[in-house]
Image (cartoon, helix red, strand yellow):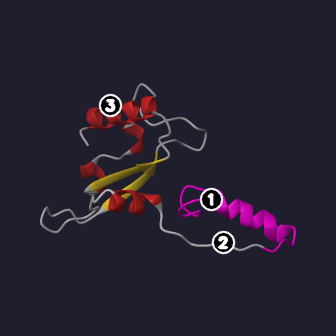
Amino acid sequence: KGGDPFLFGRTRTEIESLRANNIAYTYTPNISSCIAGPHLGGIPLTDAFLNCQSFGVWSGTDAFGKSIGTGSDCGDELGFTRDGLSVDTLVFLMIGRLDKLEGLCNALIKSGS
């Protein structure tokens, strides 16, 4: 698995299964794409000059594969509004397709984020 296998992954349940079956395993910690991607693009997640001191990371889909922004409430139930969480930079992972990205952008606009 790429990036951080403990972030939005099934690592815990996979490790539990390995342990239950006495199967040896190893994992290699990596830098998560939520940090590596913006850094590779020269985009700081925080910036003292802009008074941007925090960032939050969300999955672009829920545990059942439903994308953010596809329901009638367009993400209101997720609570990713900037004021509600005091998060300066929003990072979304696992968006997948461009139509899902469009739904996420529409949900963010509707929520005022």
Considering every residue shown, the one lying at the far right of the view is 21
The residue at the point 32 percent across, 31 percent down is 106
Residue under label 1: 1
Query: Considering only order in the chain, which callout, 1 or 2, is on the residue closer to the N terminus?
Result: 1
What residue sits 24% from the left and 38% below the top? Answer: 112
Q: List the residue tagged with mark 2.
A: 27
User: Disc 2 versus disc 1: distance between alpha carbons?
Assistant: 9 Å
Q: Earlier in the sequence, mark 2 or mark 3?
A: 2
- Residue indicated by mark 3: 106
Q: Total number of numbered labels?
A: 3
In the image, 45 versus 37, the foreground residue is 37
Q: Which residues are magenta?
A: 1-24
Query: Is 55 left or right of 8, judged from the image as shown?
Result: left
Q: Quadrant of the N terminus?
A: bottom right
Residue 74 appears in the picture as rendered: no
Is residue 21 one of those drawn in magenta? yes
